[in-house]
Amino acid sequence: MGNVFGSFLRRPEAGSVLSLIAVIAFFVIFGGVNLGNMLGAASWVNLAANLGIVAIPMGLLMISGELDISIGAMIPAGSMTVAIISGYYGLPIIFGIAGALALGVIVGTINGLLTVKTSVPSLIITLGTLVAMQGIVLSASVLLTGNASVALTSPVWAKTLFGQLLGGSFQVIILWWVAISALFLVIVHHTPWGNWIFAMGGDKVSARNAGIPTERLTIGLFILSATSAAFVGMCGAILFNSAQVSGGMNYIFNAVVSVVVGGTLLTGGFGSVLGIFFGTLTFAVVTQGIYFTDIDRNWSSLIIGVMLLVAVLMNNSFRKAAISYSPRKKK
Amino acid sequence: MTHAVLELKNVNKSFGPIDVLHDINLKVNAGEVLCLLGDNGAGKSTLIKTLAGVHKPTTGEIFMDGEQVSFDKPKEAADRGIATVHQFGGTFPLMSIGRSFFVGCEPVKKFGPFKIFDRKTANEVAVKAVRDFGITRIDDGDRLIGGLSGGERQSLAIARAVHFGARVLILDEPTAALGVKQASHVLRIILEARKRGLAVIFITHQVTHAMAVGDHFAVLIRGAVAANFMRGEKSREEITDLMAGGEALADLDSAMEAQSEATGGEPAQSAARATVA
């Protein structure tokens, strides 16, 4: 029993699972929350799903030693692209969807190429593309439609796949999030590709010398990240029948918090998909769950800040324990 | 006639106007340990990077088994069986032993079209490979590299190179950061690799370590091979002198002697100042 608990603590996701339990316990004890009401609510699951889809590629990039903050502009870019193509110009929705995802691929390729071909840190590169994409989205929208907000009506099949409300309030994107998480759980922890991502974050030069295509893999991860962000934006536009040029900036820090609470090492080489999943859940429970408590919701940022620090400290000591761990001598 | 596994003929390397290597001629045979000695800045790193395919020689030729080779990138050298192990050995501290052992060539199980990383096989093979080299403390492939001692990491890296068919093993100062006991572990593993017929190039500036395992020695000074000799041809003092540039150390010796005579055998601080003045 102690052994099982010990090996759980050495896993990257330990901190996030404990944080989730701690936050829920805190809300129940000090917030007088009705647990059934809170856990059954759609608000935090919806938030977790939208955030989770960008947090997973963000986490993978972080494991591989890079960072992509341009997602903040790619979310509105994705929703504006589908709305302009299919809403304003009235082309079939499939072109809008393809356009949004293609934009993700293009921006991701630019981020990736700039990162592998220069020695500029990817934080700075994606900061550049973040600001540049905001400019492009705003001016393209005003130039093409004369407006910063565009309406979109989608056919039933697109609505069902990307913008449906299940049970009246649960966004269908929740299913996408769970499916994507499961897919990446397998890829990252049970295929050679996953091994390469960890090796790349551990030591890029050694990884390349071991024959890993580090440049292609880095570019691929940036494409994944930008495309996922465009996907989230696209689903939002289809769900709400309209798209705005603003919004998306919150996702940058929220995703970083989720990933770091989830036990991913900012400098790369350590982390897990399950950890990111639970980190996202924890984040969503704190920001949305607070509405179900007696606590004033303005405190939620404080809770997130404290939780982030506590989770990072926990993760640090768990990681040290994992490194120094060696099985006891058999008697 | 048998050829040396790796041979360098008149290799020169310059970076722009700066000549780093001059006319290097070296060869290493299978089952032989070549010790490359040299002070910091003597060109050891450049030489091994040239062998490992990181740099291309400006002029000169490299032969493997008598056949001329030219490497455009490290992968090509690795494919020919040249493996380099750096000072800190396993460089993925947060990966498990099994995973880091197989980085770049993971064993997989096939499930239809999917290839799943075979953790069990990876761990078993990695642990067995290290234990075959006499490191019996490693018995769990899920342990993280960061938890191993420096000597164990070196051993793991050497075992890894041998497992993947290395024929030439380049060890870049493997004992520099290690304690006495750990270093002797690594030296034993070098001997084991030699016994298995590998050509080992052992870079060090610790003469004692070199003398313990070397068959053949080359001293590098300012980018040129200053001496090239076999085991037993030179004493430890002679080698140390050579590495320090010969005269320099001899001068230091006589200066010390002169000083201790002047102060009646006690090199006191004030006396030392007086001598200098």
Image (cartoon, rainbow, N blue to C red):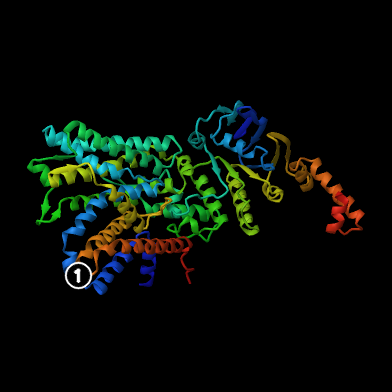
Give the residue drawn at x 46%, y 42%: A210
The crowd level at tag 1 (other Cα within 10 Å; few <14, some 14-19, many 20+) is some
Nearer to me, B134 or A269:
A269
Count numbered badges in the picture: 1
In the rendered view, does B168 fall on the left or right side of A199? right
* Label 1 SS: helix
In the rendered view, does A85 fall on the left or right side of B32? left
Q: Quadrant of the N terminus of chain A?
A: bottom left
Image position, residue B145 (x, y; %)? 48, 55
Quarter of the image for residue A103 reads: top left
> Which residue position holds label 1?
A35
Give the residue drawn at x 47%, y 68%: A328
Residue B229 visible in the picture: yes
Give the residue drawn at x 40%, y 49%: A198
A12 lies above or below B244: below
A148 lies above or below A298: above
Residue B2 visible in the picture: no
B16 lies above or below A147: above
Nearer to me, B23 or A16:
A16
Image position, residue B256 (x, y; %)? 85, 51
In the rendered view, does B27 fall on the left or right side of A99? right
Task: Determine the residue located farthest toward the top in the rendered image.
Answer: B59
A278 lies above or below A183: below
Image position, residue A207 (x, y; %)? 45, 43
Give the residue drawn at x 40%, y 38%: A115
- Looking at the picture, which amino acid does disc 1 mark? Leu
Image position, residue A253 (x, y; %)? 32, 52
Nearer to me, A132 or B212:
A132
Quarter of the image for residue A19 reads: bottom left
